[in-house]
Image (cartoon, rainbow, N blue to C red):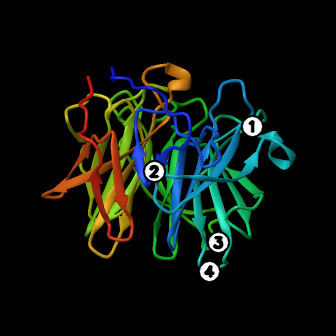
Amino acid sequence: MLACTAVRPTQSGSLGVIHNDTIWHDTDGNEIWSNGGDILREGDTFYWLGYETRPDHPWRMNLYASSDLANWRFLNDVAAMKGEFRKLGWAGRPALLHNPRTGKYVIVFEADGPEWTRHKVGFAVSDTIDGNYTLVRTEYPEPGRSTGDQSVYREGADAYLVTVLDAPGFGGPNNYDLAIYKLTPDFLAIDRKVFEGFAGPRGRSGDAEAPSVIKRGATYYLFVSGLRGWHSTATQYATAPALEGPWSAWRILYTLPESCDSFNTQHDLVMPIVGREGTVWLYVGDRYTQWHTIGIGRNVFLPLVWQDNIPTLKWLRDWRVDVSAGRFSPVHKAREQR
């Protein structure tokens, strides 16, 4: 269990400092609600999209902006359970894309509705990043296959859906394995399947969910959390020379100091912060304290460091990212988790 600290009453960061083990607030002093989402960088601005998982509250997707990854300004609830989105009982795991061909902004998300079985993939579009998005479609990734947690991977002008896939036939096991699909050139539909695999011995994706992909050098890394509902888990990863594979077996992500549950988080995403001197690999973790009541805070940002192409998740309670240089530094002595 984590050592707990007092809740900070105002902003999530001061002077560009990221504070973990606390409830984050936006620059207006309001609590940040952004789980299971995505971060898109445009120039000097980071846009953080997440879904609000407040108990007994209608779903919505909140968009925030920051230049330092510590102080976040609320922009808009870009999609919510109203209007054309009202038919969706749940809309989670939103991923944010900018299409270089059309100039449009696209949200790809996990969509539930009372008239269909399990999750479909939802697509919404806007002319501006912080606008009110319009629902375009919801679809199964392929006939007879529904989905679980998902994300997107961007490479050049192309985008890919990375998702937990259910077994063929809607009566089959949920979270059966993992799949990667290329999106159509407008990012508003699924084009074709690139990869499917990782079915576990119990027919459950190796007990993995919350997948995301990065590329470092010539190697692709697929990160996942464990399959424990809202609870925190160890993060696992696999590697491959191409999205099509072959993918390695799962490996547990090293942590420093040692943590059996990724410092009380569920993996959400990893993204490179590229600067003039280097690259900071940012691990974004969800801490669903509103559901499991363990620890403090709902969001954790940590550096992912590398040695011989092996990643390690490093705990820092207070730290700063120099986004222009692509460097990070601790602000106070890191305190070990218990």
Give the alpha-carbon distance from disc 4 to disc 2, as whole Å. 25 Å
From the viewer's perspective, is residue 70 above or below residue 47? Answer: above
Residue of label 4: 101
Residue of label 1: 113
Could you say which is closer to the camera, residue 235 or residue 256? 256
Question: Marks 3 and 1: CB-CB under 8 Å?
Answer: no
Q: Position of residue 101 (x, y in %)?
A: 62, 80
> What kind of residue is marked 1?
Gly
The tag earlier along the polypeptide, 4 or 1, is 4
Give the alpha-carbon distance from disc 4 to disc 1, as whole Å. 31 Å
Looking at the rendered structure, the secondary structure element under dot 3 is: loop
Q: Position of residue 169 (x, y in %)?
A: 58, 37
The tag earlier along the polypeptide, 3 or 2, is 2
The tag earlier along the polypeptide, 2 or 1, is 1
> What kind of residue is marked 2?
Ala
Side of 158 relative to 64 (left or right): left
- What's the residue at 37%, 29% (across, down)? 264
Q: Position of residue 247 (x, y in %)?
A: 28, 53
Question: Which quarter of the rendered picture does the N terminus lie within?
Answer: top left
Question: Marks 3 and 4: CB-CB under 8 Å?
Answer: yes
Disc sitting over residue 186 in the figure: 3
Hey, which quadrant is residue 131 in on the image? bottom right
Question: Is residue 206 something one can see in this rendering?
Answer: yes
> What kind of residue is marked 4?
Arg
Which mark's residue is nearer the viewer, 4 or 2?
4
Question: Which quarter of the rendered picture does the C terminus lie within?
Answer: top left
Which residue is most to the right?
83
The tag earlier along the polypeptide, 3 or 1, is 1
Disc sitting over residue 314 in the figure: none
Residue of label 2: 179
